[in-house]
Image (spheres, rainbow, N blue to C red):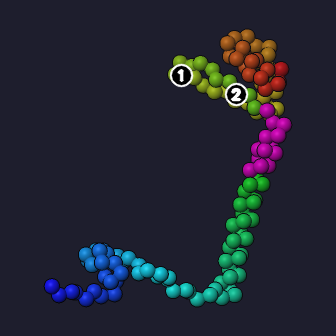
Amino acid sequence: MASERRSGIEEYCPYSAVARGLGFLCMPPNYRPPRGEPLTRRERRALSIAGASVLLASAGIGAWELAARGGGGSGRVCVSVVVPSSTGGGTITHCGLDARSWCAGEARAEGSIAQLARSACRRAGLS
């Protein structure tokens, strides 16, 4: 029996895909990819500007969302009532000043929806 001499990759990966002709490699032990060139001052500046732009845009969107929700919900009360319907159920939701006026109107009304609304308004502290 003559021993066969293996070439490069096959020496490190005897059962590798290259040896079987599939076209992808396995890395030899202690393999490290070659280091690339360091970034130039112009490239570093461009990356810094891009990163700062993304950061500022994210902060701006967050502030806009916070302002659109009226301060993140502090002091803003929402009332939700699930009412029966012929196709299952529906949800009635009112928030803030709209919830206060809706609860005041439902406090004077009669009916099953008004009864559900009064209990929801009581739980929210609006009655």
> Quick check: 104 left or right of 87?
right
Which residue: 78% across, 54% down? 63
Please state the extent of the stretch shown in magenta in the rendering. 65-77
Residue 108 to residue 76: above or below = above
Q: Count how many numbered circles sit on residues in the image.
A: 2
Where residue 55 sits, quadrant-wise, is: bottom right
Which residue: 81% across, 45% down? 71
Where residue 24 sits, quadrant-wise, is: bottom left
* Of residues 86 and 14, the one drawn nearer to the viewer in this rendering: 14
Q: Which quadrant holds the N terminus?
A: bottom left
> In the orientation shown, which residue stands out farthest toward the left?
1
> Residue 80's mark?
2
Q: Amino acid at mark 1?
A: Gly
Rendering coords of residue 34 (x, y %): 51, 86
Q: Main secondary structure of the magenta part?
A: loop
> Quick check: 75 left or right of 93?
right
Secondary structure found at label 1: strand
Which residue: 78% across, 44% down? 72
71 is within the stretch colored magenta: yes
> In the orientation shown, which residue stands out farthest toward the top?
110
Q: CA distance from mark 2 to mark 1?
A: 16 Å
Where residue 116 sits, quadrant-wise, is: top right
Q: Amino acid at mark 2?
A: Ser
Earlier-in-chain disc, 2 versus 1:
2
Q: Which quadrant holds the C terminus?
A: top right
Q: Which residue is mark 1?
A: 88
* Of residues 126 and 87, the one drawn nearer to the viewer in this rendering: 126
